[in-house]
Amino acid sequence: MSKSVIVVGTGNAALCAALAALEKGAQVTLLEKADEALAGGNTKYTAGAMRFAYDGAKDLLPLLRDPDDARLSHTDFGSYTTDKFAADLLGFNDGRPLSDEQMTLVETSGETMRWLAQHEVKFEPIWARQSFEKDGRHVFWGGLTLAAENEGVGLFDMEMAAVTRLGGTVRYNAAVTGLIMDGTRVTGVRVGDEELLADAVVLASGGFEANEDLRVKHMGPNWQAAKVRGTPHNTGDGLLMALDAGAAEYGLYAGCHATPMDLHMADFGGLDLPPSERKNYRKISYFLGVMLNAEGARFVDEGANFRNYTYAQYGAAILEQPGQFAWQVFDSKVFDLLYAEYRFHDAHFVEAPTLEELAAKMEGIAPHATLATLNAYNAAVDEACPFDPTVLDGKGTAGITPPKSNWAQKIDAGPFRAFPVTGGITFTYGGLKVDTDGTVTARDGSKIEGLFACGEIVGGVFYAGYPGGSGLTSGAVFGRRAGYGAAA
């Protein structure tokens, strides 16, 4: 007799859990808190990029929707080994060793992508954001090469189509309000006054980033000001239910993915916009210019590493500044290199022919200190080193703190533009501990039978930050594992 599995949520992790359980013959029902238009958790808000280990182009071609794209013949994808992926994660651990969860992510990332492709979830090279043209070739950088076709919306649509083909069903406007327990075993869920029984429940309901009280409790008062760039429905409901059922807290509750965002965006990433446009409030081309706080001072090394290794941390750095905002400043030399979101119809910026006039237009910032900082930065740039955005070019500064380690060009070619930004929280890192089959671990170290978890609710995957694209991959890896476990 087939198992009955309830999956709480409809984001990437939830859909992968459902797909895996359906593969094993389970009857699967997904319960979604939102209506159909807002289903998908944070997945629809993403650019759909997925980081995984691969040895070269031969590993990527079977994953592509269009393996005959003419550009592929003059593209350098490089490779991204499991050792490199592990080293990248370790670099964000603040001295912690790699966790079991991180090793699982690294070691199964490639096979999980191939598994998705077998279910007609297809990908395309991230030409615009992860490559630069050099000597007539498209050169990819930073170990991140593929995104789902049509980005996060496409990932959701393809995964949902796969779930539907295998017989999964979805209920919308069905917020789970509690777990049903038989002793220490979870036997179902409550949706309001309704009780739904199942052999297994998979919590894939996201983190607590949209819950202001929990953000302040776990992360501090500055996080009250954070913009929530994803779904308004990730309020920690599943996490709190699991903790009430005896689950252990696990991971870094003070940590999160936080990105520089347009200061004047509405909360929840622009729910009035089509899902594919909601990411356009990000402002992550800071590596081509400088970021200044209200005192007119720089506060991060904008060129410390490739953008996809720093952007998830620099939103938090902005929230640590006075007033929880900053300005990103660029000159006309790089306007054509800025990502498309800087040309988004709702992008806020000021422009002026001189730096003096620009500083006067930058609201909330000390203009004299701003000019002094920009002049000191310009004087510190190493002009002998060539600028090359395809590599860590070593074109840095000397004698200023913080330094800019790469891609440091003088800001001296008018007109000049400045974009106001703040920190936008994407997802939280603290959550639950799960066993090797995805079962949630209790505070006494035992398994909570019948309860599984995946996605943002799983702790121990990320600590002080993460290399871009790892979040969706983690959702797929742990979703697949939880689905197999729930169906077993």
Image (cartoon, helix red, strand yellow):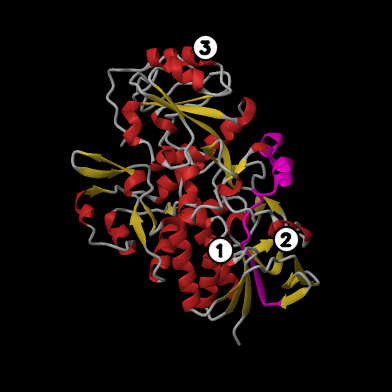
Q: Nearer the viewer, mark 2 or mark 1?
A: 1
Tell me which amino acid carries mark 2.
Answer: Ala
Up-down relation of residue 30 to residue 246 (above or below): below
| Magenta stretch holds residue 232 | no
Crowd tier of the residue under label 3, counting other residues whose Cα lies within 10 Å: few below 14, some 14–19, many 20 or above: few
Residue position marked by numbered label 1 in the rendering: 37
Residue 379 image offset from top left, x and y in percent: 38, 12
Mark 1 or mark 3, earlier in chain: 1
Q: Describe residue 442's horizontal placement relative to residue 468 as left or right.
A: right
Q: Position of residue 454 (x, y in %)?
A: 59, 61
Mark closest to the chain's N terminus, 2 or 1: 1
User: Which quarter of the rendering shows the N terminus?
Assistant: bottom right
Which residue is at the front of the view, 161 or 141? Answer: 161
Residue ID for mark 2:
242
When asked about the image quadrant of residue 197, the answer is bottom right
Report the side of 191 relative to 103 (left or right). right
Disc nearer the start of the sequence (3/2): 2
Q: What residue lies at 39% left-to-right and 53% top-to-bottom? A: 53
Label 1 and label 3: CA atoms lie apart by 48 Å
Instruction: Provide the residue designation for mark 3.
Output: 368
Find the residue positioned furthest to the right.
183
Camera sees residue 94: no
Q: Are marks 3 and 2 in contact (CB under 8 Å)?
A: no
Which amino acid, mark 1?
A: Ala
C-alpha separation, residue under disc 3 versus residue under disc 2: 53 Å
Q: Is residue 221 magenta?
A: yes
Q: Residues within 10 Å of mark 2 (few under 14, many from 20)?
A: many
Q: Quadrant of residue 58?
A: bottom left
Q: Dot 3: what SS? A: helix
Residue 1 position (above or below residue 338) = below
- Please determine whether, in this image, residue 237 is positioned above or below residue 194: above
Q: Which residues are magenta?
A: 197-224
